[in-house]
Image (spheres, grey):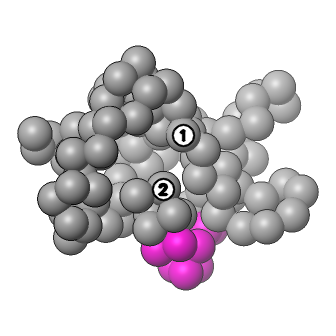
Amino acid sequence: MIGRIQQALREDARMVAAATRAQALLPSDRRALLVWDGDWVLNPGEAGRGLAGLRQAIAVEIAFAPAECRRQTERGLVLLTLADGPGAPRLALGTGAWRWSDLTGGR
């Protein structure tokens, strides 16, 4: 799932731009933009929780993934990088133990 979502976001210039803008507003000691920690997070400079466009793009990838992928259990944070190289936007998702379907409200 990590690779599936990361690739979809990397291929969408609007998602990369949104993440870049939001990450630029973070304090310099934060290296990744936390977008989901059991609930979608409100980030600086954005009206919607979880950066509405990113949230929707992630949810679509999860919704169309095979059921076994949606049920996959993760522990802690996962990191998505939206480009290669230094300064690339990075998104963090996760909390304790969770499943990808949790991001869509599904079980």
Picture quarter with the C terminus: top left
> Looking at the image, which residue is at 53% across and 72% down?
7
Q: Which residue is mark 1?
A: 78
Say few, some or many: other residues with alpha carbon within 10 Å of mark 1 (under 14 / 14 to 19 / 20 or more): few
Kindly indicate whether the residue at mark 1 contacts the one at mark 2 (C-beta within 8 angstroms): yes
Whether 8 is among the magenta residues is yes
Element under disc 2: helix
Is most of the magenta stretch helix, strand or loop? helix
Could you tell whether 68 is left or right of 33 in the image?
A: left
Q: Which residue is mark 2?
A: 2
User: Residue 41 sits in which quadrant?
Assistant: top left
Asked which quadrant contains residue 37, the reply is top left
Q: In the current view of this chain or complex, which residue is farthest to the front?
A: 68
Which span of residues is magenta-colored?
Answer: 7-17
Tell me if mark 2 has few (under 14), some (14-19) or many (20+) residues whose alpha carbon lies within 10 angstroms of its own: few
Q: Which of the two discs, 2 and 1, labels the residue nearer the N terminus? A: 2
Position of the N terminus, as image quadrant, is bottom left
Placement of 62 over or under 34, stated as above or below: below
Question: Measuring 64% from the left and 63% from the top, which residue is drawn there?
Answer: 82
